[in-house]
Amino acid sequence: MLATRRILEGPLAREVARFGVPLAVGMALQTTFNLVDAYMVGQLPREEVGPAIGALGICDQVAALGTIFSYGVSTASSAIVANRAGAQDKEGVATAAWQSILIVTALGVLFGVLGIGFAGTIVRDIIGAKGGVALFATRYLRVVVGGSITIFLLLQLASIQRALGSAKTPVSLLLAGNVLNVVLAIVLMFGPGPAPAAFAWAGPIAAFFHIPRMGMLGAAWATIIARGVVLVPNMIILARRFQIVIPPRGQRGPRRDEISRIVGVAWPSSAQMVIRITAMLMVNSLVARFFTSETDQVATTGLGLVFRVDTMALFVAMGWGSAAQTFVGQNMGAGQDARASLSGWTTAVYDGLTNIGLMALLLLHGEAILRIFDDDAGPVGVALRYLAIIAPTYIGLGVGIVLGNAMAGAGATRTSMWIDVAVILGLQAPLSIVAVAVFDASLDTLFRCVGATNVVSALVYAVVYGRGKWRHAAAARIT
């Protein structure tokens, strides 16, 4: 296959850029569509906007926990698929792909049940959200997490295509799904009632189909429906282009040996990302418990504003990290360890350059961007304080994620997990809790704890990756 030859034999810097740019841009645009969702929420009646924005910040992170479990399976199976593709093992590729699909389907059902049954407990008792934020978040979470299976399968099918050397097609389909998501969200959120002038076209459509005005909840339903629709062409492409099809009768059930291999690589990756998301939830929880009240949720709303902007750096790094994972996996499968290692460094440099541009954009125009979603000076002020401290550390965040994904491409997910355990649980969590709960520190101090973690994480990942022991320790897990 031409894509595999390029990954294994082409000029490395050019091929990493050719493969990685669509993934990074696609992830950035996906975040842009999330920002469009936030903008639309900002067009709701003023009494709904503050609680809804705060609820979005909480729900995005809680929903991400489920996605992270699925992402771990995607990371593991992609490493195995890429490795076998590099070794020209077509049967092994098909087996790993099918078994991974079975795993994420089971996870989707499990998290759907948890989301529908325990949304209120999560929002009020675990996160500590209050007032209108808690009400909006509970309703939204039931729908988004209840429909988790759609995003689990969508990301899994895209990961399989990427591992086989296709970057543009899965990204294009993800973007098509996001465009559909935006269109549906406008119709479902505003229904046949009053809407901003730019969305007036949605009223007649909603009236024709008898769709009521759903407010913020409409955005959740739009997301689930759009993802479900895009699953269909993904399945068709996997079958026709890559011959990943439903196995014959008698071979469709779970295979213990293959599932054990995937889970063995997946659980550290899932645990690692759960630790990262839990750290973000911890920040939200500390803010909710120490800097808000039943009548004053400005700080939580401010975080809701900035987290959707903030995730741009995370998503771009994940896009470049996906490229690093594919290059490392395929080159190690072909026995090209030196090229595999250099792929990770090359991709980290590209991500660093991307994040320099993003940092400059947010530091120069952050206020104008934030005011698109909420013009209230209080939350915007909190968000700007966050960006002033955190944006300069985006390079560190990106380097850590890219090099972690590069090691995951070799199956070294345990190495990445232990790094995050040491840095996040050993540094950020105790530092943040002690600062706020014991020393009554300010919001800015809490934000500095997050920024320091990004920097330390990058340094640790660079040292571990540079030593190279992860290549040999991981090889046996994915062959």
Image (tube, grey):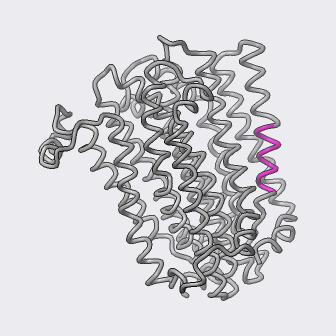
Q: Residue at x 59, y 15 (%)?
A: 291
Q: Main secondary structure of the magenta part?
A: helix
| Residue 104 shown left or right of residue 472 in the figure | left
Position of residue 19 measured from the top left corner of the image (x, y, whole percent): 54, 70
Position of residue 416 measured from the top left corner of the image (x, y, whole percent): 77, 54
Q: Residue at x 63, y 60 (%)?
A: 321
| Residue 292 shown left or right of residue 333 in the figure | left
Q: Quadrant of residue 5?
A: bottom right
Rendered position, 379 above or below 427: above
Position of residue 351 measured from the top left corner of the image (x, y, whole percent): 60, 55
Can residue 120 be seen here? The reply is yes
Q: Residue at x 43, y 77 (%)?
A: 237
Q: Residue at x 31, y 21 (%)?
A: 46
Q: Quadrant of residue 247?
A: bottom right
Q: Quadrant of the N terminus?
A: bottom right
Q: Quadrant of the C terminus?
A: bottom right
Q: Quadrant of residue 92?
A: bottom right
Q: Which residues are magenta?
A: 415-425
